[in-house]
Image: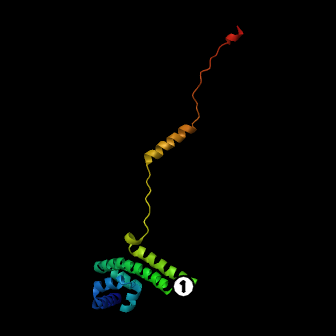
Amino acid sequence: MPGRKFEEEVMAKIKTLGGSDFVLDFIGDGGTVTELAKIVGCSRSFLSRILNKRPEYRAALEEGRRLQADAFAEDSMEIVDTMAANGNFRSEDVQLAKERVSVRKWMAALNNPDKYAPKEKGITINVGNLHLDALKKVSREMLDVTPKVVEIGHDRSED
């Protein structure tokens, strides 16, 4: 199969670059699978597919992305600090920097959600209290349908 031969050639190129350690360092330093694919001479989707089917490379990609999240966070700080140090900027510069930081925050949260994704606040629900409140509400709204005793007979005042 011609595809198999090409896959072996691509993997040989990656091994000469340093194998899974190279992939980990390349991605961890902020590189992308697209950039790596250009280096080894194949498409991004092909490279992603062949790396992800090999456990040592899949692990390198995952760890590299966690490290990359830290690089994105540091890069965001550098963007803001550089802009603040320059001091002379237009509103367009601020908007661009804000967008660049926003994308890096999103990528950091995507690559390492445990560390960078916003934490959702937990909601505590006490089902027992909800049930009791519902029963109290129903009892307040119920009509009193208890029969009342009415004396039947004649009125003694007429005597």
Considering every residue shown, the one lying at the far right of the view is 158
* Residue in the picture at 49% in, 43% down: 133
Element type where label 1 sits in the image: helix
In the picture, the quarter occupied by the C terminus is: top right
* Residue in the picture at 28% in, 86% down: 19
In the picture, the quarter occupied by the N terminus is: bottom left
**Residue 67 placement (x, y as % from top left):** 35, 79
Q: Residues within 10 Å of mark 1 (few under 14, many from 20)?
A: few
**Residue 78 placement (x, y as % from top left):** 43, 83
The quarter of the displayed image where residue 29 is located: bottom left
Residue 135 left/right relative to 40: right
- Total residue callouts: 1
Q: Is residue 58 visible?
A: yes
Q: Amino acid at mark 1?
A: Asp
Front-most of 55 and 124?
124
* Residue in the picture at 39% in, 77% down: 69
* Residue in the picture at 40% in, 80% down: 74
Label 1 sits on residue: 93
